[in-house]
Image (cartoon, helix red, strand yellow):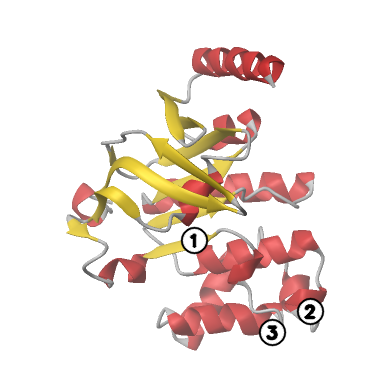
Amino acid sequence: MKGSSLPRLRLLVRLWRWQLGRRLAEGQGRLERRLLGAMGGLLGVGMLGMGLVLDLVAPTEGQVLLDGQDVRHTTAWKRHTAAYLDESFLIPFLTPREYLTFVGQVYGLDEATCRERLEALAPFLEPALLAERKYLRDLSAGNRQRVGLAAALLVQPRLLVLDEPFEHLDPAARRQLRQFLLDYRERSGATILFTSHSLEEVFGLARRVLVMEDGRIVRDVSAEDKVRAELEAYFAMEAKKA
């Protein structure tokens, strides 16, 4: 896939504000790069500053550009962007197939295309789960996670954002998801940004790693073995401080 067809995502971030329960944190950092067909992992220290970047209220300064367009002034980017952050994305009174079909319809997929893409997701989304007549609210946490992730992948986004995608999944499902994301990135050239508290998960997927602490980007490195050793030492030191 040629570079012209890929999303050019430019983040200019200086100061953000997040609300977590009654705690308000202010983070400062600057990230000015082009993420083009890359898999980026966000690693966090503690509760504040990592997953929260995916739930921003509004920037006090800076902008987000996708294909050169400020996302605040257009909605065109929504057609090729997908995310799964938590179970609030699900519709609890629908079955897995009903929910996935609904998501496909929202993105303008016809029945044949939706069916074809669901079949392609079979290595991760087991056929038995699609045939399940239970409502999403009655499924296990792991199966709800599978359905939510499958919905994001169903639309074949050029930009995919995931928060703790391996949470609730058993070891076999984690391996399946990891391989599916790697294959999808290579096949589509999509840009994927995900958060995790696990070095193993991040280095198993990402080409680039951002470490956040108290809302600040404290490290921005490539995912290499020598970097992993440095980060293991860094997190061990932070754990002693706690």
In the rendered image of this protein, does residue 226 appear above or below residue 191?
A: above
For disc 1, the marked residue is: 83
Using the image, determine if residue 151 lies above or below residue 43.
below
Question: Percent from the top left, x then y, of residue 129?
Answer: 75, 72
Q: Secondary structure at mark 2?
A: loop
Q: Are marks 3 and 1 in contact (CB under 8 Å)?
A: no
Residue at the disc numbered 2: 132
Chain-order first, disc 3 or disc 2: 3
Q: Residue at x 70, y 49 (%)?
A: 167
Question: From mark 3 to mark 1, how far is it between C-alphas?
Answer: 19 Å
> Which disc, if any, is residue 94?
3
Q: Amino acid at mark 3?
A: Leu
C-alpha gap between disc 1 and disc 2? 24 Å
Among the two numbered marks 1 and 2 on one chain, the one whose residue lies closer to the N terminus: 1
Mark 3 or 1, nearer chain start: 1
Q: Looking at numbered disc 1 in the image, what kind of residue is underneath it?
A: Ala
Q: Note whether residue 182 is visible.
A: no
